Image (cartoon, helix red, strand yellow):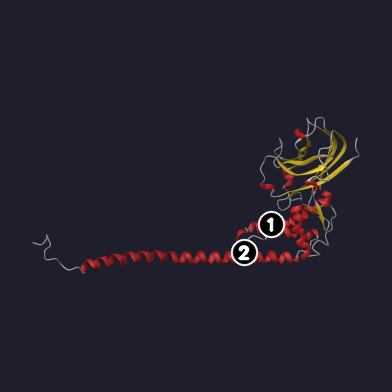
Amino acid sequence: MENQMDNNFTWVIKNFTDLPSNKIYSDEFVVGGCRWRLLAYPKGNNKPDHFSLFVDVVDPELLPLGWRRHAKVFLTIVNQYSDKLSLVREAKQHWFGENLSNWGFQDMITRTKLHAGEGFMVNGEVIVAVNVKVLEVEGQLDVSEETSPAMETTYVNGFQLLPSQVQSVNRLFERHQDIAKEIRTKNPYLRTGYMTVLLSLTESLSQSPTEISKGDLADQYAALAYLKDAGFELGWLEKKLDEVKEKKEKAEDCLARLQEMEEQINPLKRKYTDMEAQIDKVRAELLAAGAPVSLYDDKAV
């Protein structure tokens, strides 16, 4: 038996309503010498009215013969309005082995509750967290927590980030040092979710204003309000969003004026084309009328 090992992992599921009905997987994480991941069914696994969620051992068929992990699992749907309202479900202590490599809940949360605007889905994003406590290990350790790429997360100013996020977040803090100074929550799941929303918002503003729909713009303002309520200092970002809105309105105004002018000029274009055809016809008649009369025309009497 080994000492108890545990690990927390957060998964931010983006564009939840657009996800396919079949299963989706999170990135991998390592605990107890095994690679794990979260397995989710956005539209339920044999429970069509629910969101189903499981913790899953990666590639169990490749692990050594006789391996087993005695573990306790806590699965959480994070409430992004209040951590106290988060839905936490505890799976009983269970031996993960060759014959059973995942464990969780088909009825993790009803889809009605998930879509009810109560904080479980905000701006199309659902935040899922898992805590895996490995109590006993049987069989050779398969991977190392120290070397596994799944563990390569970095803390930047109190936020746990993936390698792909570090550069963007560092750039944010270089330009806006007090951006997260007033954030109230210390919950790592919520903080990770907040930063993911912020990065998504800043990335969306790199688009051309003409490519951003009115619905997208409304979502961006909602995300901004959500982050400001959480304590982020985003006056600078609000100005940028207002600038995007102004440019979009200007572009829409220009498009409307161009359409109006085209509608006005199209009848003139058609009239011009008709006049051109009439001119060509009259020119042909003039050419025929100006031709000299032949004295040796066969038709002459």
| Percent coordinates x, y for residue 187 in the rendering | 84, 52
- Residue at point 78% right, 46% down? 150
| Relative height, residue 281 to residue 109 (above, below) | below
Mark 2: amino acid: Lys
User: In the displayed structure, does residue 221 sit left or right of residue 190?
Assistant: left
Whether residue 81 can be seen here: no
Q: Between disc 1 and disc 2, whose residue precedes?
A: 1
Residue on which disc 1 sits? 219
- Residue at point 72% right, 65% down? 238
Q: How many residues crowd mark 1 within 10 Å: few (<14), some (14–19), many (20+)?
A: some
| Percent coordinates x, y for residue 14 in the rendering | 71, 50
Along the line of sight, which residue is nearer the eye, 128 or 62?
62
| Percent coordinates x, y for residue 34 in the rendering | 81, 39
Res. 234 image quadrant: bottom right
Of all residues shown, which one is farthest toward the left? 301
| Relative height, residue 199 to residue 59 (above, below) | below
User: In the displayed structure, does residue 134 sit left or right of residue 128?
Assistant: right
Q: Quadrant of the N terminus?
A: top right
Mark 1 residue element? helix
Q: Quadrant of the C terminus?
A: bottom left
Whether residue 195 can be seen here: yes
Residue on which disc 2 sits? 248
Along the line of sight, which residue is nearer the eye, 100 or 197?
100
| Percent coordinates x, y for residue 195 in the rendering | 77, 56
- Residue at point 65% right, 57% down? 216
- Residue at point 57% right, 66% down? 253
- Total of numbered circles in the picture? 2
| Relative height, residue 144 to residue 300 (above, below) | above
Mark 2 residue element? helix
